[in-house]
Image (cartoon, grey):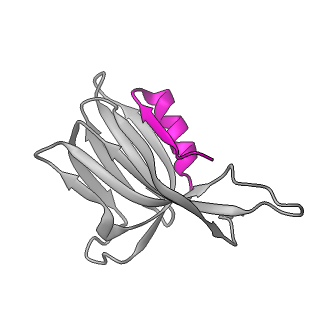
Amino acid sequence: MDQLKLAALDEDDLKVISAYVQDALMQIGDIDYSPARKWFLVPMNRFVRDGKRRFFRRQYERRRSVLHFEHVLSVRSTGIDRQNIKDVLSLLAIRFVPGEAPAGTIELVFAGDAAIRLEVELIEARLADLGPAWATSSRPFHGV
């Protein structure tokens, strides 16, 4: 598979990106916010859901990727200890909560009841793979 490059300019686009980054892993210390530039950057190890098939089972892969948000006015988090920079977060979904159009809140929802909320002027996000995939022997499981 070629390296993925996606852009989101509305809520529907953001849902597509959310599907591609479900179960991505990231370290707290890698997440970056620049209030002066109004951007928020999330480097991650993205789980590739459309990986290659083997004869008896699918070969699971991860790719180093970056998720970049523009027009970010503020960032808040809950359930995340920003002092523990080596802790790993598992991204479950990205949601948009509309405000006064085109503004709103982008929510990054993580396992363990953690979340990051970005107050944005409008939706502008990009997801890009940064390099080749590597094999992983397991896939995320969301059992009840």
In the image: residue 78, left or right of residue 23: left
Instruction: Determine the residue positioned at 39% across, 35% down.
Output: 97
Image spot of residue 138 (x, y percent): 69, 70
Instruction: Determine the residue positioned at 27% across, 70% down.
Output: 82
Range of magenta residues: 1-22
Quarter occupied by residue 103: top left
Q: Is residue 109 above or below residue 97?
A: below
Image spot of residue 112 (x, y percent): 49, 67
Q: Is residue 82 above or below residue 123?
A: below
User: The C terminus appears in which quarter of the rendering?
Assistant: bottom right
In the image: residue 100, left or right of residue 37: right
Instruction: Determine the residue positioned at 35% across, 55% down.
Output: 42
Residue 115 in magenta stretch:
no
Q: Is residue 31 above or below residue 74?
A: below
Q: Is residue 144 visible?
A: no
Residue 2 in magenta stretch:
yes
Quarter occupied by residue 133: bottom right
Q: Is residue 31 visible?
A: yes
Which residue occupies the extreme top position in the image? 101
Image spot of residue 143 (x, y percent): 72, 63
Between 106 and 129, the one lying in front of the other is: 129
